[in-house]
Image (cartoon, rainbow, N blue to C red):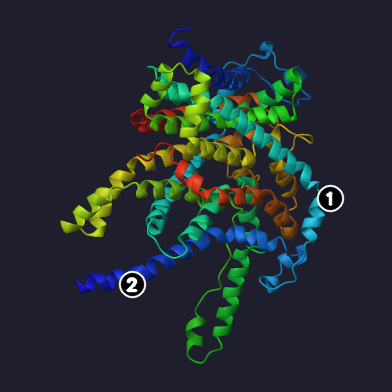
Amino acid sequence: MSDRSIPRLLQTPAVILLLVWMIVPLSMTLYFSFIRYVLNSLRKPEWTTPSISNWRGFGNYEYVLNAKDFWFAIQNSVFIVSSILILTVLLGLCIAVLVNRSFPGRGIVRVLLISPFFVMPAVNAVLWINMILDPVLGLQGIAVNGLNDLIDGLRDFPVLGSFFSLWPEFEPISFRATQTSAYAVIMMVTWQWTPFAVLIFMTSLQSEDESQKEAATLDGAGPWSQFINLTVPHLARPIAIVVMIQSIFHLSLYAEIEIVSRGNGNKNLPYLIGEFSSNNIGAASATGIFAVILANIIAIFLLRMVGKSLMD
Amino acid sequence: MAAVTERSKIGNILWPVVAWIVALIFFFPIFWLVFTSFKTDADAVKPEHLFFFTPTLENYTNMTENYDYWRFAINSVITSSFATLFALAVGVPCAYAMAFNPSRHTKDILMWMLSTKMLPAAAVLYPMTFITKNFLGIFDTHFLVILVLCLINLPIAIWMLFTYFKEIPKEIIEASKMDGVTTWGEIKDILIPLAWGGVASTALLTFIFCWNEAYWTVRLTTIDAATLSKLIEGNRAPEGLFFGRLSAVSTAAVMPIVILGWFCQKQLVQGLTFGAVK
């Protein structure tokens, strides 16, 4: 065997597996997206089996583009993913800087901080929406009620009472409405993925060149200017990696959306596909193709960002 | 100068306290989950029993007796372990070749692999169900779950392995080639011992992702190969009133992996950089 064929041979299994994994379902999705294909139809039973004679051309695509859910779902997907990215990167940076010094119990702090990353997404969603954010039974409801009772009690005090009597009653927020449930999803995913950002930023901070910092201190640079001029450029690459890995995971966010917002209108693209595919496979497939296109646009953008420095 | 030391003295006390508070806030939801799992369903929703209650194991005995927890747990262990093993078996040689014999296309191949991870699972769910049910007849088998878990984690695993292998000096591998060591020998005796930390943390992360996967495992199984995510899926339906029961099931599904994560935390922190750290 020649020198080049062994490395190629070693890559083949992975490449073939992923190629099949990508191409077979994708080409079926593409096919279904051009035909009329529904799971149940009393009026048109012939549509319930996939067949080339039910050709619909771009009809499914037109149908999806005209569905008002579709544009909302795209907007919502982008809103949720970008909010999560911004929050995790900012929180991750702050916490990484905070933990990147030695203090008593640092090991335990690190273990506690990392824990949310290991939690199953489905459990994460169930835990947050029911036990923490529920306006009646969850901690939120209990805390708001407790606060109201406390203010009620303070009203009886002689002087302060007149001040507190002006306070309005607090209302717990329901996180089951369309807009608020998007916030709930952002909150729980941020909770889960901030530890990941912390981990990567922390490792990167530890590899920072300390002698550079000492030189800067001698030159009279304050901690803030050191952070901006030395630490932030050093963190550019880890930030790119965090953004990329998280985009990969959050573009296909499903479990959280499904559990938090069943049927209340807070959809993202994967969830909309799921909704369509309960009956209209044609429309679901067309939406799927749109989702693939969107993912690819984002992928090209992200991969270029990271890919450049990957090979050095 | 005096002002500076004064300020750093306050900082020395203040920042660790802030760090502790942040850590406790982040950990609190997990604590609350475990805490609630020892309450009865009735106690779990009563504000007067928020912190004080008679702990009970009722939810756990109920779970093992009525929900067959162990079957789901064993399925999770089997599928996640084998998927991790296969991902490494396919990923290590691939990453090895990419790191030590890169061609013009290596970067593109790597990027393409990662981009398969971005395909929305929902878009191909129906074809997948169709193929596995009607053509291959492997729906709801361990084999299918292992295969799918392996495939969805393969790109990330290869990327992680690639970034570790790249750090190993090429000369070491080339020297062994001169000595007539076979490719398999190079991987087994030189590469894996040298990159052991990276391989271990890749395995760990893959295992965690497999364990927590809840899209395919829920939709491609019914009973036989159902994993813990399926158990959660089935138990979350009656919302609100059964916090105790829900917490126990969730705790039992999550804790094995959280504890594993705690023990391997150092390893994971070292390894989880995806080439971000130079």
Q: Amino acid at mark 2?
A: Ile
Relative image position of residue A273 (x, y in whole percent):
61, 32
The chain ID associated with circle 2 is B
Residue located beneath label 2 in the image: B10
Nearest the viewer among A74 and A23 is: A23
Question: What is the crowding at mark 2: few (fewer than 14 residues within 10 Å), some, or many (at least 20)?
Answer: few
Relative image position of residue B180 (x, y in whole percent):
45, 16
**Residue beneath the point at 50% across and 77% down:** A167
Quadrant in which residue B212 is drawn: top right
Relative image position of residue A49 (x, y in whole percent):
74, 18
Q: Mark 2 vs mark 1: which is more N-terminal? A: 2
Work out which quarter of the rendered image holds the C terminus of chain A and state it: top left
Question: What is the crowding at mark 1: few (fewer than 14 residues within 10 Å), some, or many (at least 20)?
Answer: few
Residue located beneath label 1 in the image: B66
The answer to whether any part of residue A235 appears in the image is yes
Residue at far bottom of view: A158
Q: Is residue B165 above or below residue A17?
A: below
Whole-number angstrom distance, CA of label 2 to CA of label 1? 55 Å
Co-location on one chain, circles 2 and 1: yes
Residue at far left of view: A219
**Residue beneath the point at 74% across and 27% down:** B139
**Residue beneath the point at 41% across and 38% down:** A241
Apparent side of residue A26 relative to residue B190 in the rendered image (left or right): right
**Residue beneath the point at 44% across and 65% down:** A104
In the structure shown, which secondary structural element does the residue marked by tag 1 occupy? helix
Apparent side of residue B128 relative to residue A91 in the rendered image (left or right): right
Nearest the viewer among B86 and A25 is: B86
Residue at far front of view: B179
